[in-house]
Image: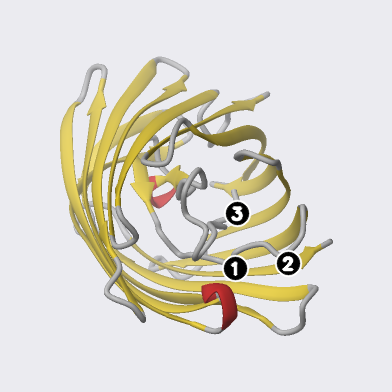
Amino acid sequence: MPVVTPGKDARGEQPVRIPGIRSGGWLLLVLPCAALAADNEVGIGYSPSNLSDGYTEWQDLRAHWKRRLEKGSWELSLLQAHRFEQDDTQFMLGGSYPLSQDWSVNGQAGYTADADVLAEQVYDLGLSRFFGERWSVSLAANLATYPGDKVYGGELSVEWMPRPFRVTAGLLYGSLQDSGHAWSQLFQLDYVYGEDDEGTLGIGVITGEQPERITADQVAVSDADAMFIGGSHWLTPRWGIDYRFTQYRRELFYTRDELSLNLLMRF
């Protein structure tokens, strides 16, 4: 799923939530992209990951189409994931809508046909409250279903924007139906620049525990520590890039490095 969120025009445009560390848990990554100057945005992306065992490689191919409406927006995305020598294709449909000047709601749903390595179904619903131009609080609930297990999750995040910076702190919860609970924390600092705040450069850390799909047949709670850097830049009024490098330290299972690159076009 593409990690694309608007910059300045945040009302009604919630941060995209993606499966935490490719698992059944959920992780809030606020890596903002540009505030759109056009009604449509399309993007393609590639994410290779290397595991510490030296021979296992994960790969993701992504595509998305985002349509901005008079109020809110909707987004359609496609993820082709390669894990444990198996492949899955996941379809996602989401959207956001401003309820008022101070409130907005967003949601998304996903489906995977075979679900060999990804969740069979994914649902996410979020609500945000804005306090002027500098503060916002978001609350979300989510569900990911796997063969033989379900992962229930929740997120609470606070965003502060002392321009030209953006500070985000989040608390994430994941509960496996039969295998325990997990808590994790997120902190992220972004530098925002350019007209309409359409350029970002950020760094963040994640600590705690998260649900993880360890194999094609097993979902478990594991220790999770990660650090990531990333940003987004519009090279021309039409073309932009979005990138992120993340290093995961998985004490119980493995260590993984991931690079995510996205090419964006708006029209």
Residue that mark 1 sits on: 34
Which mark is first along the chain, 2 or 3? 3
- Which residue is the extreme one toward the right? 267
How far is mark 1 from mark 2, CA to CA? 10 Å
| Residue identifier under label 3 | 2
Query: Looking at numbered disc 1 in the image, what kind of residue is underneath it?
Result: Ala
Residue type at mark 3: give it. Pro
For image coordinates 68% across by 24% down, the residue present is 113
Q: Which mark is residue 264?
A: 2
- So how many labels did they put on this image? 3
Left or right of residue 47: residue 53: left
Q: Are marks 1 and 2 in contact (CB under 8 Å)?
A: yes
Q: Which of the marked residues, 1 or 2, is nearer the chain's N terminus? A: 1
- Mark 3 or mark 2: which is in front? 2
Q: For this rendering, which residue is in front, 52 or 194?
A: 194
- Front-most of 26 and 237? 237
Label 2 SS: strand
Q: Say which quadrant the C terminus sits in.
A: bottom right
Q: Residue at x 36, y 81 (%)?
A: 164
Please state which of the two labelled residues, at mark 1 or mark 2, is closer to the viewer.
Answer: 1
Secondary structure beneath disc 3? loop
Q: Quadrant of residue 257?
A: bottom left
